[in-house]
Amino acid sequence: MLKIVAKFTKLMEKDSILFDEFFSHPNKIFINHILGMLYENDTALEKMVKIYHDIAKLKNNFQIYIRDKSKAKNKEHSLLSGYFFVSNSDFDELDTLFGFLTIISHHAYIKDFYSLKDPNKNFGECYQNSIEFSFANEVIKNAKTFSKFKDIKFDNIHEKAKKLSRYLLLSEFKHKFSYDDFIDFKSLYSNLIFNDKFEAIFSSKFTPSKPIQLKPLEKYIENLVKDEDKNLPENKKREDFRQFVLSNFDKNHSLYTLTAPTGYGKTLTALNFALKFKKERVIFSLPFTSIIDQTYDIISKIYPHLEVQKIHHKTTIQDDKNEDIDLDSDRYSKVKFMLNSFSADINITTMYQLIYAIFGNSNKDNVKFHSLKNSVIIVDEAQALPYKFRQDFIKLCEIISEKLNSVFILMSATMPVINSPKFKEISNLNYFKHQNRYKIKYLDKNEDELIRQIKLASKDKHTLVVVNTIKKAQELYFKFKDEFQAYSINGYMTDDHKLQIICDIKKQLKNKNNKSKKILLISTQSIEAGVDLSFEVGFREISPISSIIQTAGRINRSGEFGGGVLYVFDSISKFESLIYGDLQNISGSIFKILKQKEVKESEILEFSNIYFEKIHTLLENLYLKDSMAKLKFETINGKIDEIMKENRYKKLIIVEPKPNFISDLEQEFFNYKNNDEFKIKEFRNNIIKKIIKHGVNISQNDIKNFGTRLEKVKFCDISYLPFNAPEYDKNVGILKASSDKMIFL
């Protein structure tokens, strides 16, 4: 038997080997995969890129590898496939280069456009030394067994490469690309990788779902309010708002802003508006994972029979009963694709994921980009878009809506300047003038006086205190916890504990039989957006105006307390410039107004507009313009990274939620190790997501002060605090070290 295997192996290594059939993926016929990716509405360029993207998988080494993963010598196929595309292309130089870059990047990330002329690769000097050229003849021989490739050629590759090299050299100095070119390339690239993955996993063409029915949503909204409560002012206000927004529907328009005070039901109203377009899907972008979970719970209840997916870094794959399960490999791959591609009917995700889908250069980000096509994209809390690239984002929204037949709806109670006449406001801004739920007042007190004021308020009022650092939030919690029914929410707590505290507070606030028991919540800015809690009085440490207004949205939210007050006090955390940077400086001149007179809720829109006008005038520009001009895909991604990677000085630490939680998962993983490498990888990834649901990003400085030794998860590079470690308190999270370095969220 061993002799036969050895003889077979020797034969396999010869160039002359013949295969009865060619595979593109394990047990998948090559030509079926290629044909399964082609669609009638593909452009000529898209079709040809798809036809040639895997052509070099016909080389013998790849066919050996796909049958036996231990034989991985010279199995790569992207570069040679790219050269075959070039050799057979009749497109102009730019389209040919776009096609080539798409193919060589389809298993990796997109490189800067002009890297195509780097020495020793692609079309740079000495490119012809690539070992890939030695496999061309066997690819041609094998390809000609298919009618699709009967006219395949490669003898002109060096002539074409020389021409493209000259084009690249001249173009770099003479040509400036536009934001449109950026989207054109990403459309081509994402079309390939989305359909490549989809056909490989599902063995069929992608078929869009039918438009989502409005009736279940409308019925849910109607049932939210009992008949006898429909005429209550707050309920009538929400319904009037919804009807006003819906009256602005225009199927021929695609760019909208929706600006309305907190508590008006923007989320369901926006979904109602979005569904009227009858697009293939809805993508909901929200700034925090806790709000995503909350929104997902509501929408999946309204549409139990639709594909409603929540997509963030802690999402695990679940069954229909919302329980974690061990899926078979085939179904796991399908569900994983739905999660990673925004291709469900309703996708609820983070602003982070949407930003990288639009700007990112990785394969996984651009699978999502493809799903922006024929979609409605709702961006909630639009003020949370980083101001440095906010104008770039707006410009790309304009282009995507036009080229991909998409609709964008930007929502906020504090809308930043959207410097585009193409965006249409669909709310009535006069709603702000009729609001009288709260006032914002400046409180000129030192810390001791402030604490006395908080104590006084907390005796007979539900009270919210928001400070700028986790350390200060924890200090205040321990100061108040013995005297009041105190709670804390901050970024050093696990999501489970934060959600549990929010649920406990909601129950207490709704308990009308216990009016004497008042809630005191000490929070960081984690409370600011999307958390549906309402307090009688609030205290907010000085911060940018937008953050103060967001905190004010938690005061007398539904008008149930008659009137509320938010007091703004001077810094007691002392790290505002590190936390808020330029935004704090912009706010300085506006605070002069607040120190002179209180601001009523009816004046908030004007107050907010002054702030965002200053940001727009002094800080905003087309941040990525120069990088776009050279199509520097890696550079653009890097610049977004610099702004978005707030956690670069932190480390993810898992807080073990119960005894043996990690060891049980480790055992589960090692019991699975006899499967093939692809199944093991998928299983491992899902277990990791189960683990990081209990993760917290901790500063390196605080980790150094841990007394408990961190343990390592045995099958991945993740550290965890064992169950019941003294460094974690479920009431306040990871206990801050005694340090001058602050952490904020």
Image (tube, grey):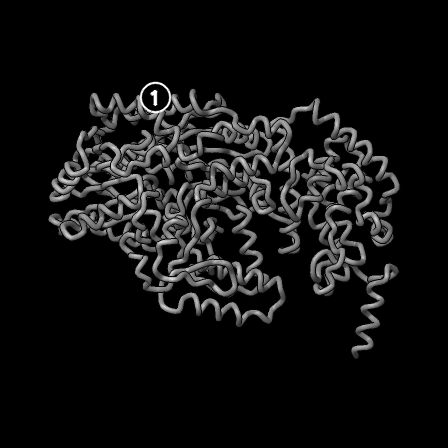
Q: Residue at x 19, y 42 (%)?
A: 463
Residue situated in front as seen by the camera: 265 or 569: 569
**Residue at the outermost bottom position:** 1
Q: Which residue in the structure is indicated by mark 1? A: 610
Determine if residue 231 is in view.
no
Residue 175 vs 410, above or below: the answer is above
Q: Is residue 471 left or right of residue 672?
A: left
Residue at position x 43%, y 35% from top?
273
Q: Is residue 494 left or right of residue 208?
A: left
Task: Indicate whether 482 appears above or below 69.
Answer: above
Locate residue 149, reporting x and y percent.
Answer: 83, 47
Q: Residue at x 82, y 33 (%)?
A: 162
Q: Quadrant of residue 607?
A: top left
Residue under the point 47% across and 41% down: 645
Q: Is residue 631 visible?
A: yes
Q: Quadrant of the N terminus?
A: bottom right
Q: Amino acid at mark 1?
A: Ile
Q: How many marks?
A: 1
Q: Quadrant of residue 436?
A: top left
Q: Is residue 343 above or below residue 639?
A: below
Residue 546: x and y in percent read: 34, 31
Per the image, label 1 sits on a secondary structure element best described as: helix
Residue 207 is left or right of residue 475, and the answer is: right
Dot 1, crowdedness within 10 Å: few (<14), some or many (≥20)?
Answer: some
Q: Position of residue 8 (x, y in %)?
A: 82, 70
Quarter of the rendering occupied by the C terminus: top left
Q: Is residue 15 left or right of residue 506?
A: right
**How far from the left and from the top, in percent, is residue 138?**
85, 53
The foreground one among 11 and 702 is: 702
Question: Which sits in the foreground, 154 or 207?
Answer: 154
